Image: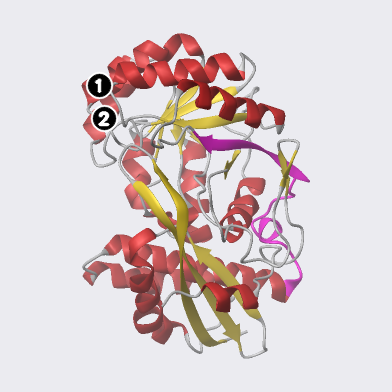
């Protein structure tokens, strides 16, 4: 099964109303869809997460740098293909963007191999998937004019939808002001609702610790990206000072980048993102490393239905972790913010029902890309 052609398409859709986290504003939804075609006529597709401003650069990297190394290769030789593509990173001026491009290709290869063998990616990875996974919403975004009452209504809507919980945005205000927002969320959600907080690397160590001590009585499931991802010493200080589990890793890539987070136990919960970490192949290695060190893994997900499908296939084959008599089931992050193309890019949408998402059980990623939608949304 040899690769015949590679096509990457950038998509940009402006939003009707902007929103954001502590360190970013979401003005549009952007993604890259990659299509690989074999000499046998099979087509594999996958997305590259919400890459905002650099979708065109990802497309260029796939077409100009990766495609020449892929054409004619046997796609069943996935490990050697990944290593060959990764070798480009040694001379790349922007390794992060290159890894996002490699993630596109790697996930599409898994989709193709699954289709060729008539098996899901989860099955190829050695797992027997459950029928569904519980979900946690991503919410609490900053928006002009948003009140504590609005936050309360938002949490109530998640509960009424049956969701297990919410990952709530903080880090954009003072620790005291954000603690007040989280308090409003907890009061509205009730005690039996998973409430995590995500600072998106918005605080210093001192502010992160001050905030966390204010919200510790609110039964916070985890505190995500309290400081800059490069500040490993800061992670160590925050983790040592707090009782709340510390989470991070969405901005990191490759097993070597994740190694200190795991081996030095700088986080309690590791959050690799398939679209950033290097694809399904690399994220599975990262998860296995974490499992060996007793570190929980809950992959980060933020993008289209194709992002959800790829992440579902991986999460479904991960062991409940950490190892022991009382493992914790991973939660699927399911963003509820405005996303005009979230489900439009696939022929059968992935939907949550009563707080659960069914895992696609078809071959490969279990989805099919809507070609008409790609043509309609294609950027530029």
Q: What's the residue at 64%, 71% (across, down)?
A: 369
Q: Residue furthest top?
A: 217
Q: Regarding mark 1 in the picture, which secondary structure is present there? A: helix
Q: Residue furthest front?
A: 145
- 337 over 104 or under it: above or below: above
Name which quarter of the figure residue 350 lies in: bottom right
Q: What's the residue at 52%, 27% (across, down)?
A: 150
Question: Is any atom of residue 322 visible in this view?
Answer: no
Q: Nearer the viewer, residue 376 or 159?
A: 376
Spatial CA distance of label 1 from label 2 is: 6 Å
Q: Quadrant of the N terminus?
A: bottom right
Near mark 1 (Cα within 10 A), the count class, few <14, some 14-19 or many ≥20, is some
Asked if disc 1 and disc 2 are in contact, CB closer than 8 Å, the reply is yes
- 245 over 66 or under it: above or below: above
**Residue 121 lies in magenta, yes or no?**
yes
Near mark 2 (Cα within 10 A), the count class, few <14, some 14-19 or many ≥20, is many
Name which quarter of the figure residue 39 lies in: bottom right
Q: What's the residue at 44%, 36% (across, down)?
A: 141
Q: Position of residue 238 (x, y in %)?
A: 30, 23
Residue holding disc 2? 203
Residue holding disc 1? 207
Q: Position of residue 116 (x, y in %)?
A: 71, 76
On residue 119, which mark appears? none
Q: What's the residue at 67%, 27% (across, down)?
A: 159
Question: Is any atom of residue 252 visible in this view?
Answer: yes
Residue range corresponding to the magenta coloring = 117-139
């Amino acid at each position: 099964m040899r690769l015949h052609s590679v096509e990457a398409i950038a998509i940009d859709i402006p939003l009707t109303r902007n929103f954001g986290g502590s360190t970013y504003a979401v003005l549009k939804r952007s993604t890259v869809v990659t299509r690989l075609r074999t000499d046998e006529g099979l087509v594999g597709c996958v997305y590259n997460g919400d890459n905002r401003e650099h979708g065109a650069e990802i497309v260029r990297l796939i077409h100009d740098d990766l495609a020449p190394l892929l054409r004619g290769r046997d796609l069943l030789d996935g490990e050697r293909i990944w290593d060959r593509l990764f070798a480009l990173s040694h001379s790349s001026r922007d390794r992060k963007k290159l890894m996002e491009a490699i993630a596109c290709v790697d996930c599409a290869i898994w989709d193709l191999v699954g289709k060729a063998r008539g098996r899901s990616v989860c099955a190829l990875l050695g797992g027997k998937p459950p029928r569904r996974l519980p979900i946690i919403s991503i919410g609490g975004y900053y928006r002009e004019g948003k009140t504590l009452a609005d936050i309360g209504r938002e949490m109530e809507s998640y509960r009424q939808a049956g969701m297990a919980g919410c990952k709530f945005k903080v880090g954009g205000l003072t620790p005291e002001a954000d603690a007040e927002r989280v308090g409003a969320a907890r009061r509205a959600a009730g005690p039996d609702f998973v409430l995590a907080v995500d600072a998106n690397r918005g605080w210093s160590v001192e502010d992160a610790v001050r905030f966390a001590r204010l919200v510790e009585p609110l039964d916070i499931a985890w505190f995500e990206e309290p400081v800059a991802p490069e500040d490993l010493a800061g992670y160590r200080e925050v983790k040592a000072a707090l009782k709340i589990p510390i989470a991070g890793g969405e901005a990191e890539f490759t097993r070597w980048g994740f190694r200190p987070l795991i081996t030095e136990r700088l986080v309690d919960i590791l959050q690799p993102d398939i679209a950033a970490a290097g694809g399904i192949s690399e994220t599975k290695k990262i998860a296995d490393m974490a499992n060996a060190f007793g570190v929980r893994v809950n992959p980060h997900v933020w993008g289209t239905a194709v992002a959800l499908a790829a992440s579902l296939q991986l999460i479904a084959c991960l062991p409940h972790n950490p190892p022991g008599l009382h493992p914790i089931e991973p939660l699927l992050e399911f963003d509820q913010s405005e996303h005009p193309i979230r489900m439009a890019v696939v022929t059968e949408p992935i939907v949550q029902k009563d707080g659960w998402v069914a895992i696609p059980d078809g071959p490969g990623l279990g989805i099919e890309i809507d070609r008409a939608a790609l043509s309609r949304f294609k950027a530029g």
